[in-house]
Image (cartoon, rainbow, N blue to C red):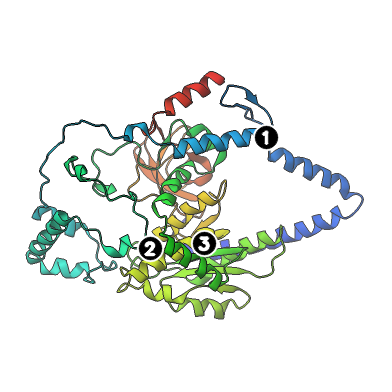
Amino acid sequence: MDRTKENRQEYKESQHRVKREVSKAKQKAYDELYTRLDTREGEKDLYRLARQRDRDGKDVQQVRVIKDRDGRVLTSEESVQRRWKEYFEELMNEENEREKRVEGVNSVEQKVDKIRKDEVRKALKRMKSGKAVGPDGIPVEVWKRVGEAAVEFLTSLFNRVLESERMPEEWRSVLVPIFKNKGEDHDRDVQVVELPIVDSLHPRPPYLPLAIPEDLAPRLQRLHGDPSVWWVSQFVKYLVRPQPWLEKEIQEAGIKLGFKHPIIGVHVRRTDKVGTEAAFHPIEEYMLHVEEQFQLMAQRMQLDKKRVYLATDDPSLLQEAKNKYPDYEFISDNSISWSAGLHNRYTENSLKGVILDIHFLSQTDFLVCTFSSQVCRVAYEIMQTLHPDASSYFYSLDDIYYFGGQNAHNQIAIYAHRPRTAEDVALEPGDVIGVAGNHWDGYSKGLNRRLGRTGLYPSYKVKEKIETVKYPTYPKADKLLNSENRGK
């Protein structure tokens, strides 16, 4: 196939037409099914469907019994669920014995090296042009243009910040700090450990995403469609806890906006990433998938209105969406869109706006967005903490899900593939493929690590390779794992 730009556009248009026809055919088939179920002949079909749905809801491949604290076997579904609840409450909330303060330890005194000019010079060189400005309101292009004078000034500024240890008040006022207490005087003697940005970690720890804990892996793979996202989501949810006053504002904003279910979240980013890291997507592309989801919802519930929570950094988009889709109810706060502009993005109001958008996007029943934007990825992560399994509650117009700075994302071939074009890469069952991206046209791109060759391959011919790591984070993990192994 000649994958030119024109052919790709033609393919997309054809794909949209096919999806619309498939949706119509599905609706017709369901209508015929419901009509048949109302007849005497349909009683057998109804019984068969009910029996199949009941069977699908049961885990027939796994033994659904576990033991309680005293080693007694639990067999009822209610007691099993209660035991799982107790287990995870203990696992996630008990204090770690390793974190207890040890008295009488000699203090460690170590000089912290100052930030050097060459470090600042390298950091400036790595920064991308065309991005949003920081709290100082100065574009990175200006710092690069000033040259060595900028390096001198920034080095001096950063060292003053390092010595004063002051956190920007805009951030402190909104989010709950990870450590609620300010610390004690003798904490000043504790050795300082530098934590660089995740891309600069060397050597790279094996427990970075997308890895998950070894002891939780078997259960997570049974219970969740994307265990890596679930694991990340637990930390994200904890780290972005709002201050009490902000939590109250969020609740009041939901009432003011009229936020209620069913509702689909749409996030459109159009400022600093478009043209550099992401392509422009018109509102029609988003709404195509919104309409598909509402058609699916209509098959299982009564829809009074088709509500869409629209989050965007383009203030003109809300009115455009209302004009083009008058049968939809768009819920949005346009003041957030104005504050998300490049010149306002690092103000306190803008930060609150982003937090509100992420909160309401995570609360929706389905997300349509671009995963090249971290706003949508964070909303998707938080969404996982609100449902047993929300891994499929999204459609991304560009990237697959990723965690910035993650370790390699690998897949395993489950079917052989013979290249049909020069762009394809061969696959054999068991091959490990380093994922580069999903083209959303039935093909993905990646590196066949056995062949050392990069190319396209059918997405359905692979499965995710779940990386598991033994996390040295809680002392009871080994005991729990050994106890479970003995009980098998």
Q: Residue at x 72, y 64 (%)?
A: 302
Determine whether, in the image, residue 200 is placed left or right of residue 412: left
Residues tagged 1 and 2 counted as in contact (Cβ below 8 A): no
Q: Which mark is residue 368?
A: 3
Badge 1 amino acid: Glu
Q: Total of numbered circles in the picture? A: 3
Q: Nearer the viewer's eye, disc 3 or disc 1?
A: 1
Of the residues under marks 2 and 3, which one precedes in the sequence?
2
Residue 18 vs 408, above or below: the answer is below
The location of residue 266, given as percent across then percent down, is 51, 65
Outermost top residue: 486
- Give the Cα separation between the discs numbered 3 and 1: 35 Å
Left or right, residue 157 beside residue 346: left
Dot 1 corresponds to which residue?
77
Neighbor class of circle 3 (other Cα within 10 Å; few <14, some 14-19, many 20+) is many
Q: Which residue is mark 2?
A: 278
Question: Where on the picture, by quarter, is residue 427?
Answer: top left
Judge depth for marks 2 and 3 and give the one in front. Answer: 3
Which residue does the image show at 12% across and 46% down from the upper left? 112
Distance from the alpha carbon under mark 1 to that under mark 2: 47 Å
Vertical position of residue 29 compared to residue 454: above or below: below
Mark 1 crowdedness (10 Å alpha carbons): few <14, some 14-19, many ≥20 = few
Seen as rendered, the residue at the extreme right is 40
How far separated are the C-alphas under marks 2 and 3? 15 Å
| Location of residue 185 with respect to 292 vertically, above or below | above
Q: Which mark is residue 296?
A: none
